[in-house]
Each structure stands twice: as structure tokens, then as C-alpha cells.
Image: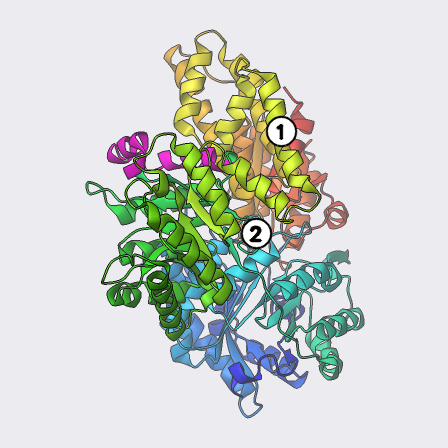
């Protein structure tokens, strides 16, 4: 089978769950599934054959957790495990026509800024897996169950750069329609499309019916073939065993609907068995080949997308040390994250996209660019435009940026196009295309449009469509070349009317050398808008720019009913009528938490400590600010990266308070002690670690027992410290029974403890069934539980 030719031409069937089958065949709690490739290859071969006999066209290797981090305690190497796994799958599929997919799951550690896993470290883990799997004979790469777009990006690049196999990439979504880190289905699709995966989609997460709305959104957002591997519903307990509540017939009914919508690949995740795959054969006859969507053009970060078609897009230009004296001083002083404050200021003033320039002769431009990207991740939602004359800086930025960015810029010189276009094509970026070449900037519109056409034609030779270019016809200063100003507009109009390219301008140059520059800028801006300007690179805080844009959107019919215009001006009127106010300290703390301003919050805390007791600072300022941030998270106005950043920033305030108390031989009183553990047999501790961070920064002491914790240890530590609250975590269906056993042991020991539980396989109903007092669907819920148990201060 030529996989790439077959995708999208018929319904292709993957296999179902491996963990469920292993549990059925008696895998012991705590046993490492990947180690079975060497310890019980016959069992794995049997399971693979059952799926092949059921009609699966793709068999997934038993390598979901076969990376160097997760295997370090097994005594086996990645090479041993993956090579054996591929050989087992190849033997089971021999002569059947079924293909072998190398299964790659998450590393098992959270990516920065939430966790400690660096992009390059993640890439190295995945590269090792891909290289070994491809050498062993895998037919394609399946990257699945990713919840962080940054980790998915590292895995996809590792696959693309180290093999030529087809890449299938799926992420996992929560009930609210986003990934754990706040990525929408559409943003996932945009980002994976840009990287050029062969198939994208959803796995695990929820039952098939619950995934339907998410899948429909993905289908509307991409022309790439879509894959679905849903869970068999949610787990329920029967005779102490975790089972799922969606049977194979019900699963089939939803699969039929998915097939009719145009889903190209279907299989199963947790709880599915060969019976489910056998029934899916009935859906093959219902396959409908999708018609291509007419897609709009978007740039995006991991949390926000911005449409470049329609209303004007404002690209903020202020993150540039050459045009910002204070920022330059901060960069030279070694503080690249000062750019974050500038970023927030521009977004508040109306910027949709942020241009990032780190060009200074006395700093490492690449290093600073990466630090700014990492620093903004999870804090600043606006998509980014990377501004540099150095290809290596642009490549480094695009490589680790979670989203679809703009490159600033390429020009009509052969050397520039040869350097920049391959980078743009590799990462699926947009690019600002400057209408200049070896002869400089042409004097008239005809000369500039000629360069524009050359830029478009050459982009096509690199596989870059005209629609990914933002052509800049280059406005010169009216003070020196007044006649050239109108030539720019003529050229801009030609590009808009005769090509599929977008248009842009670095507008503020028009007023250079003239008095009352703001008047010139906003007048020329209005002229450019009527000539077909799509995006503008400018300071959004410049007088009149946003006002002009809002008014133009009304007059051009793009703001239907003038809704945005009225709302914008009403908000301006409220701010003006309120006048200057004394700073609200709680709100100030909230803003510092949201911006991750550790320096600012330490300074503010020291100031408050001069006139307030440490406990008053905590109870009257830090905790209320944290509560406000928590409400934003619960309302889905911010997501996990921002929540964790806020908690870590609050931690700096607590450090300041503890240092003050220590100087007087005092100690900050704990709100209560909590024991936390990932249960016996489970090595996944991401969720537990996130909950721990939040609880500690709310003033609780957490005794973290780690992962794969024996039942006896949980009981002993809870008894020793006489705790009121125990938190248990489990990710795998094969280990939730250990969670129930741990709760039972705590009860039998007669300990007066409350137990809260969390994990991807759990539900509130299931938590109650195993005897837990509380179910926490996310890390934030743990704080609410603690406040109920210990009382809110």
C-alpha cells in the first residue's frame, strides 16, 4: 500500500487500545507495558494478530511510552524496546497487507514554561525514537495523545527531519473543546497543516459522541485528511474492574456519522478492542471523499488565531531595541523578558500581531529571540512576526514557535529569496515580501509591481503560494520623496487587484522628518486602507491609528452594524470618565501574576511589608489576586500555561515574605498539610505536579511522594503526619484499581482523611464509585477542595 496515495481515497482503519487488551490478558498493575516487548513478545504478537484479523489496516507498535525518560527505570534501552516492538508488529502483519505505525506518545514531562522540559530536549527524545523505529522497518509515524502544541511540534519536526515516512499526528482535547494547555481544534489544525503532516486529528480524550463537535471544527478548518481514535466512552467500575460505557455497536453508529462527514482514518483508543474494529468495517461503505474547503488565512499562537482576510490586521512594531531606548537598555543589561511588558502594552492598545526584533550588535540575537519566545509562551496570546535580517535567527524562532508566524522579511534579491524561502516553506509561515531587489527600491509603481511579481513567482518555485506573502510596496518619507508616496499606493492597489497575495506597509516611515507626524500617519493610513491594505506594521498606541481603523471598518461594511466600533468607543468613554484612580493593589497584583512579572511582584510585596504584617499581605493581596486569576481560568478566559505562570509568580511573593519572616526568626504559618501521590504502577505525574504547584502557592504544605507509590507508603505517611487531605493521581486505565485499593487501605487504617483524585481516565461518577471524597477535573480544582477541607482563610 502506498499510504500517502491511499489517504483520503477510502476509510482506513487503525487498531484499537493496547492497554485495554493487556489488562484483559492479565497484565499486572505496575508492570511497564513497553517492557513486554522483551518480556512477553508472544502476547503482543497475539494482540496485534487479533486486530489484523478484525480488519485493521494499520497496527500500532507497543511503544507509546518507549522514550529514554520513561524507560530509565526498566533496565531496557530505547533501541531494544522499539526494535523488538516493530519486529513483533511486522511479524504479526506479514502477508496481510497491514502497515505498521511507530507509536510515539508524550515524553512524560511538561514542556516549558509549565514544566521543565525544553524544546530541544523533547526533540532529542523523539528523534531517538523515530530513528530507531524507521531503521527497524516501521511504515509510518503515529504521534498521539499530545496535549501541548509545543511538544507536538518537537515530535513532528523530529519525524520530518529524521525519516521520510508518512506522519499521522493527533492531539487530545478536554470537554471544553480545548487541549489541556488551551489550544483550540482550529489552531491545532492550522499549526499541523503548516508543518505538513499527512494526517491530523484527535485521539483518546472523550467518547466518540462527545468528540463529534471537536471533529466537525477540525474538518471545517483544514483540507488535510482527518483521523479519529476515540475512547469507548468513560470508565465505570464493575466488580472492581475499570470498564467503559460505550459498546462496539454504539461506537459504530458515531463512526458512521464521522465517515459521512469525511473523516479519513478511524480506529480506537482506551477501552476499544478487536470487536470495535471488526464492527467498523461496516462504516467503510459510507465513506465520502471530502471536497476542499475554501479556507481563510490565519496566523496563530498556541492560544489565539488572527484572520488575515477581512478587517485590517495591526502588527505592533514596538518590540525593537533600535526604536525603543528603554528596551535597548534592558536587552543590553541581559533582560530580554522586558519585551513581555511591551507586548502586553501593545495588545492592550489594539495590536493583533506582534513584531519581534532582537537586532543589537552587542547581544546574541538568536539567544534573545528564543528567550522572548519562551517567555511569552503561555502569557502573551497574540501571534508573532519574527523580524531579522539573519536566516539563522528566523529559523531558530520558527522552529520552536508553537503556531503559525510571519517572517519579516524577504526581498527580491536572489540571495534573499534563496535564503528565506526554504525556511518559510519548511515551517509553513507567512512572509513579508519587500519590493526591492539588487537595483534598490524602484521609483515608480510599475517597477515595484515587477519586483512583487518576481517575489510571487519565485515563492511558487519553493512551494509557497502567493497567499502566504504579505507584499510591502515600501512607503518612502514624504519629506524627501513626496511624489513617491502615491506610487506606493498605486503599487499596493495593483497587488491587491492582480494577485492572491496579502498587502502590508511599514507605515510610520511616511512621516519621518515632518512635524505632526501622527496626523500624516493616520491620514496616509486611511488612504492605504482604501487602496487595499490588509495589514499594517505600526505602533498601535500612535495617535489616531486604531480610531481610523475602527471607523474604516464601519464605512467599508466590514464591521456589520458598527458593533465593534460602538463597543470600542464606549469602553474609551468609560476609561475617560473614570479619570485617574489610586492604584488598586489587588488588581495590580493580578496584572503582575498574569504577566509573570516576578521582579515587579517582589518589589510590590516588599513595599507592602513596610506597613502591613506578612499575613495581611498574603490574605489581603496575594490570595485575592490568585483567586481572581483562578476565576479567569474557570471561565476559560485564560488557560493552564497562564495559571501555572501566575502561581509561580505568586511563589516569588511568598519567597519575599518568608525571607522577611526568617530575618525575625518567624515562619509563615501553613494553611494545612496535604499528601500527594501518583498511585502504584503509574509513572505519569504531570497532573499531580501541576496541582502541587498551585497548592503550595496558595500556602499549603505538600508532601509529594512521587509516582508509582506503594499503597502502604501512602497510608504510613498520612498517619505519620496526621494529615486531613490526601491527593491521588492516575492516568492509565490499568492503574485506577490501585487508586481504589489505596483509598480502601486509608479507610481500613481508620485515618480521618478526605481523599481527592484526578487523572485523564477519571470521571466524577467513577471517583465516587471507588470511594473518593472529591473529584478534581483539573489542577485548579485541588485548591477549591483544600479550601473546603481546611477552611478558607
Q: Which residues are magenta?
A: 322-347
Q: Please, which residue is most extreme toward the bottom here?
A: 95
> Can residue 74 be seen at all in this image of the molecule?
no
Single out the residue that lies furthest toward the front: 483
Q: Residue 278, percent across and down?
A: 72, 80
Tell me which residue sits at (77%, 64%) in the image. 246
- Mark 2, secondary structure of its residue: loop
Q: Is residue 542 above or below residue 405?
A: above
Where disc 1 sits, the SS reads helix
Q: x, y percentage for residue 264?
A: 64, 75
Query: The C terminus is located in which quarter?
Result: top right
Q: Earlier in the sequence, mark 1 or mark 2?
A: 2
Q: Nearer the viewer, residue 103 or 467?
A: 467
- The residue singled out by tag 2 in the image is 183
Left or right: residue 54 compared with residue 359: right
Residue under circle 1? 571
Across the whole image, how many numbered discs are drawn on residues?
Answer: 2
Horizontal side of 9 relative to 539 (left or right) equals right
Is 108 drawn above or below residue 511 in the view shown? below
The majority secondary structure of the magenta stretch comes to helix
Crowd tier of the residue under label 2, counting other residues whose Cα lies within 10 Å: few below 14, some 14–19, many 20 or above: many
Query: Image quadrant of residue 568?
Result: top right
Q: Is residue 366 visible?
A: yes
Mark 1 to mark 2 CA distance (whole Å)? 28 Å
Residue at image coords 71%, 59%: 213
Amino acid at each position: 500500500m502506498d499510504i500517502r496515495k491511499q489517504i483520503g481515497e477510502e476509510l482506513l482503519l487503525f487498531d484499537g487500545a493496547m492497554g485495554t487488551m493487556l489488562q484483559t490478558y492479565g497484565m499486572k498493575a505496575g508492570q511497564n507495558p513497553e517492557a513486554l516487548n522483551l518480556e512477553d513478545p508472544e502476547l503482543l504478537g497475539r494482540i496485534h494478530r487479533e486486530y489484523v484479523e478484525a480488519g485493521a489496516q494499520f497496527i500500532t507498535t507497543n511503544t507509546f511510552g518507549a522514550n529514554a525518560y520513561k524507560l530509565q527505570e526498566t533496565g531496557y534501552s530505547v533501541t531494544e524496546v522499539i526494535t523488538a516492538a516493530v519486529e513483533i508488529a511486522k511479524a504479526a502483519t506479514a502477508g496481510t497487507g497491514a502497515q505498521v505505525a511507530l507509536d510515539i506518545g508524550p515524553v512524560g514531562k511538561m514542556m516549558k514554561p509549565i514544566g521543565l522540559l525544553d524544546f530541544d530536549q523533547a526533540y532529542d527524545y523523539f528523534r531517538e525514537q523515530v530513528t530507531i523505529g524507521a531503521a527497524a522497518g516501521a511504515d509510518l509515524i503515529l504521534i498521539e495523545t499530545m496535549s501541548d502544541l509545543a511538544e507536538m511540534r518537537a515530535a513532528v519536526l523530529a519525524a520530518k527531519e529524521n525519516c521520510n515516512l508518512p506522519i499521522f499526528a493527533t492531539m487530545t482535547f478536554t470537554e471544553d473543546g480545548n487541549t489541556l494547555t488551551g489550544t483550540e481544534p482550529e489552531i491545532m489544525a492550522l499549526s499541523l497543516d503548516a508543518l505538513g503532516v499527512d494526517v491530523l486529528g484527535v485521539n483518546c480524550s472523550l467518547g466518540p459522541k462527545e468528540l463529534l463537535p471537536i471533529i466537525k471544527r477540525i474538518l471545517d478548518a483544514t483540507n488535510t485528511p482527518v483521523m479519529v481514535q476515540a475512547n469507548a466512552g468513560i470508565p465505570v467500575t464493575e466488580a472492581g474492574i475499570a470498564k467503559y460505557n460505550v459498546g462496539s455497536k454504539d461506537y459504530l453508529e458515531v463512526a458512521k456519522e464521522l465517515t459521512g462527514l469525511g473523516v479519513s482514518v478511524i480506529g480506537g483508543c482506551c477501552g476499544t478492542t478487536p470487536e470495535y474494529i471488526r464492527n467498523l468495517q461496516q462504516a467503510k461503505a459510507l465513506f465520502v471523499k471530502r471536497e476542499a474547503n475554501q479556507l481563510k488565512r490565519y496566523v496563530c499562537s498556541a492560544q489565539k488565531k488572527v484572520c488575515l482576510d477581512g478587517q485590517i490586521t495591526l502588527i505592533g512594531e514596538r518590540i525593537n531595541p533600535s526604536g525603543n531606548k528603554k528596551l535597548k537598555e534592558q536587552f543590553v543589561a541581559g533582560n530580554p523578558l522586558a519585551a513581555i511588558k511591551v507586548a502586553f502594552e501593545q495588545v492592550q492598545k489594539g495590536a493583533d500581531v506582534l513584531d519581534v526584533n532582537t537586532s543589537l550588535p552587542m547581544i546574541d540575537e538568536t539567544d534573545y529571540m528564543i528567550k522572548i519566545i519562551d517567555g511569552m509562551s503561555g502569557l502573551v496570546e497574540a501571534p508573532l512576526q519574527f523580524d531579522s535580517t539573519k536566516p539563522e535567527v528566523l529559523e531558530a524562532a520558527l522552529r520552536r514557535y508553537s503556531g503559525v508566524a510571519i517572517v519579516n522579511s524577504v526581498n527580491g534579491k536572489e540571495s534573499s529569496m534563496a535564503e528565506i524561502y526554504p525556511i518559510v516553506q519548511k515551517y509553513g509561515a507567512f512572509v513579508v515580501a519587500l519590493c526591492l531587489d539588487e537595483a534598490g527600491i524602484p521609483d515608480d509603481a510599475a517597477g515595484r509591481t515587477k519586483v512583487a511579481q518576481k517575489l510571487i513567482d519565485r515563492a511558487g518555485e519553493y512551494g509557497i503560494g502567493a497567499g502566504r506573502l504579505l507584499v510591502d510596496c515600501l512607503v518612502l518619507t514624504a519629506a524627501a520623496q513626496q511624489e513617491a508616496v502615491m506610487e506606493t499606493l498605486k503599487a499596493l492597489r495593483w497587488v491587491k487587484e492582480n494577485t492572491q497575495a496579502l498587502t502590508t506597509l511599514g507605515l510610520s516611515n511616511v512621516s519621518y522628518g515632518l512635524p505632526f507626524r501622527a496626523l500624516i500617519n493616520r491620514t496616509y493610513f486611511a488612504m492605504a486602507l482604501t487602496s487595499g491594505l490588509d495589514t499594517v506594521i505600526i505602533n498601535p498606541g500612535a495617535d489616531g491609528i486604531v480610531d481610523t481603523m475602527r471607523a474604516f471598518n464601519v464605512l467599508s461594511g466590514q464591521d456589520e452594524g458598527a458593533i465593534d466600533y460602538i463597543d470600542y468607543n464606549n469602553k474609551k468613554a468609560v476609561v475617560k470618565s473614570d479619570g485617574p484612580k489610586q492604584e488598586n493593589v489587588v488588581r495590580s497584583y493580578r496584572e503582575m501574576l498574569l504577566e509573570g512579572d516576578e521582579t515587579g511582584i517582589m518589589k510590590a510585596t516588599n513595599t507592602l511589608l513596610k506597613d502591613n504584617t506578612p499575613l495581611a499581605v498574603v490574605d489581603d493581596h496575594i490570595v485575592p489576586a490568585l483567586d481572581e486569576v483562578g476565576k479567569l481560568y474557570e471561565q476559560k478566559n485564560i488557560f493552564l500555561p497562564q495559571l501555572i505562570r501566575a502561581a509561580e509568580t505568586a511563589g516569588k511573593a511568598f519567597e519575599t515574605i518568608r525571607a522577611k519572616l526568617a530575618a525575625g526568626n518567624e515562619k509563615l504559618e501553613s494553611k494545612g498539610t496535604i499528601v500527594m501521590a501518583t498511585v502504584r504502577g503509574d509513572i505519569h505525574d504531570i497532573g499531580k505536579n501541576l496541582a502541587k504547584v498551585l497548592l503550595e502557592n496558595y500556602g499549603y504544605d505538600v508532601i509529594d511522594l512521587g509516582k508509582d507509590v506503594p499503597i502502604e507508603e501512602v497510608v504510613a505517611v498520612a498517619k505519620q503526619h496526621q494529615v486531613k487531605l490526601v491527593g491521588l493521581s492516575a492516568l492509565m486505565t490499568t492503574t485506577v484499581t490501585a487508586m481504589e485499593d489505596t483509598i480502601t487501605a486509608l479507610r481500613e487504617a481508620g485515618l480521618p482523611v478526605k481523599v481527592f483524585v484526578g487523572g485523564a481516565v477519571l470521571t466524577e461518577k467513577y471517583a465516587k464509585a471507588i470511594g473518593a471524597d472529591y473529584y478534581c477535573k483539573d489542577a485548579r480544582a485541588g485548591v477549591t477542595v483544600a479550601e473546603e477541607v481546611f477552611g478558607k482563610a
